[in-house]
Each structure stands twice: as C-alpha cells, then as structure tokens.
Image: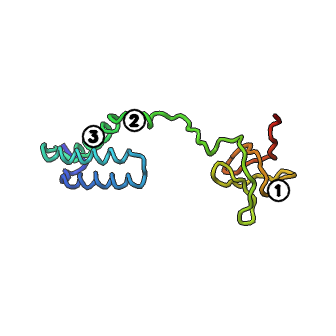
Amino acid sequence: MPTILPLMDNWLLFGLGFLLMLAELVTFTFVLLYFGLGFLLAGLLGLVIVYPAGEYQFLAGLFFGVLLFLLNRRQREAFLNKEKVEIDAFVTGGIGTLIESNGKLRVQYKGTSWPIMDLPAGVDVGDRVSVIELVDNIATIEPYKPRSQ
C-alpha cells in the first residue's frame, strides 16, 4: 500500500511538538499547546511501537492533541461557550470628564480617554459629561445633569 507521508523519526515529532508549544506563546489560545503535547505523546509512543507509515504518526499527534483538549473541561467549555462577554469599559451611562489632549477634546471615562463624536453646546474642558454610547472607540456625550434630590 503506498504511503502519503514517509515514516518520520521520533525526534521530528518531538520537534514539531515543541515548535507548536512555542507558537502557543504567541497566540495565547491554549489550543496549540494541546497539539504540541499530542505530538510529543505521538513521539513517545513511537519509541514503544513502530508506526506503519507517516500518516499514522501525524494522525496520532492530532488524535492526542484533540483528546487532551477535550479532557480539559475548562478549555472545552470556554471554546464551546460563545456567549458575548460584557466588558466593563464599554458599559455606558456613566459620568466622565472632558479633557484636552494634544489639542483634541476627549472624555476621561472608565480609566482611559476616548475621542468624542461632537461637542455639545455649553460644555467646556474640565466639565463633567454623561457618556451615552461608545461606538468604534468614539464616545457620544451630553452635558451632565445631576439628579435632583
């Protein structure tokens, strides 16, 4: 039976596993880590058994990677749970301060400054403003009206 991939040395599987784990340091998704560990396990398994062809080595690495990923419950739930995460910085309706930075008006809000869409009438630098919405990192503001007690 013809093979697609030639039989690889085990050190190549180890190298591929380490390369995938190093690539994980750049992506921060923890998926490449599992595939890297899977190829390391496939290389270790190659020390015990003889693979008939390179396809089996590659498939063993992929199989072990998927298996390790599925066995980690927290990663599996995070991957499958596609709920929208509400980021506190993008929650609007709070109060900010109008500032000037590099000659441009911005609103200081939630620990950072945001460029503003339009300057409402009667608002000056240093005034408190209400942040109505944040769209494409641009704040829409209106003059702050304190609640009457």
Is residue 32 rendered to the left or right of residue 81?
Answer: left
Q: Residue at x 66, y 51 (%)?
A: 137
Secondary element at image label 2: helix
- The residue that label 3 is drawn on is 64
Residue 74: image tag:
2
118, 36: nearer the viewer: 118
Q: CA distance from mark 1 to mark 2?
A: 49 Å
Q: Residue at x 69, y 42 (%)?
A: 92
Q: CA distance from mark 2 to mark 3?
A: 18 Å
Secondary element at image label 3: helix
Q: Position of residue 142 (x, y in %)?
A: 80, 46
- The residue that label 1 is drawn on is 124
Residue 52 visible in the current orientation:
no
Residue 22 visible in the current orientation:
yes
> How busy is the neighbourhood of tag 1: few (under 14 within 10 Å), some, or many (20 plus)?
some
Badge 2 amino acid: Arg
> How busy is the neighbourhood of tag 2: few (under 14 within 10 Å), some, or many (20 plus)?
few
Q: CA distance from mark 3 to mark 1?
A: 62 Å
Q: Position of residue 13 (x, y in %)?
A: 23, 51
Q: Earlier in the sequence, mark 1 or mark 2?
A: 2
Q: Position of residue 32 (x, y in %)?
A: 36, 47
Q: Residue at x 71, y 63 (%)?
A: 101
